[in-house]
Amino acid sequence: MMRKRSFVFGSILMAVGLLGPHAPGQIAAPAADFPMRTFFSVRSAQPDSTIPDVLREQFEKDDGSPLRSVSIDLNADGRDEKLVLCGVPSAVSGYQWLVFDPFTGVGRGVVIGTLFFVGREADSGYARLETYWRQGGKMSIVSLYTFARGRYVRSETRALSLWEASEYFRSKGPLDLDQELAEIK
């Protein structure tokens, strides 16, 4: 079933021109056009019993397993928002995360990814987010999320071949996984 879903998703991307039958070396490396403040991965998520169960309704699907979260100030107000990790991947295979504002009790959108880059640039006061995850096989997905009308929304998505993923990370510079959530100078 998962293999069929990946094939269908890949076919859709090819049909709309986001993924093509390109040989390695034919497509320019993605530009380092996302100035990042910090980054984190799934391994940064810690068990969090303070998340209200009602928020589980915002996930595409949920198995009721304990929720984990990453705390980070996304709107520079001095208070951390929480990115809440669901235990069940989305239909497109990436991890589901709910951006939650614990001070207002509001969910601010679901984002999909394994590796998160928190941007220096903001929309409506909230940092832009860029996510990466391995779709399966030889394809990875990079999505850009911007903040609009009180929620994070996906504003751009691109599929990357193995070569493009390598170039994508090369453009990011060295990432020390022991420095997750540390401010990047």
Image (cartoon, rainbow, N blue to C red):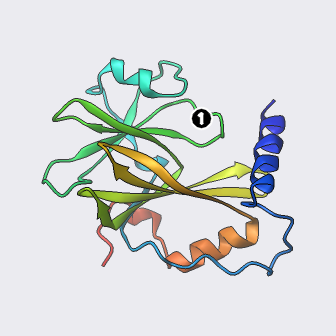
Q: Is residue 100 above or below residue 19?
A: above
The image quarter containing residue 57 is top left
Quarter of the image where the N terminus is located: top right
The image quarter containing residue 103 is top left
Under circle 1, the secondary element is: loop
* Residue at point 34%, 18% (across, down): 54
* Residue at point 77%, 47% (across, down): 12
Residue 82 position within the rendered picture, expressed as x and y whole percent measured from the top left = 30, 41
- Please name the amino acid that badge 1 sits on: Ser
- The residue indicated by pointer 1 is 90
Q: Residue furthest left?
A: 78
Tally of marks: 1
Q: Is residue 129 above or below residue 94?
A: below
Quarter of the image where the C terminus is located: bottom left
* Residue at point 84%, 36% (across, down): 4
Residue 41 position within the rendered picture, expressed as x and y whole percent measured from the top left = 47, 53
Q: Is residue 161 left or right of residue 155?
A: right
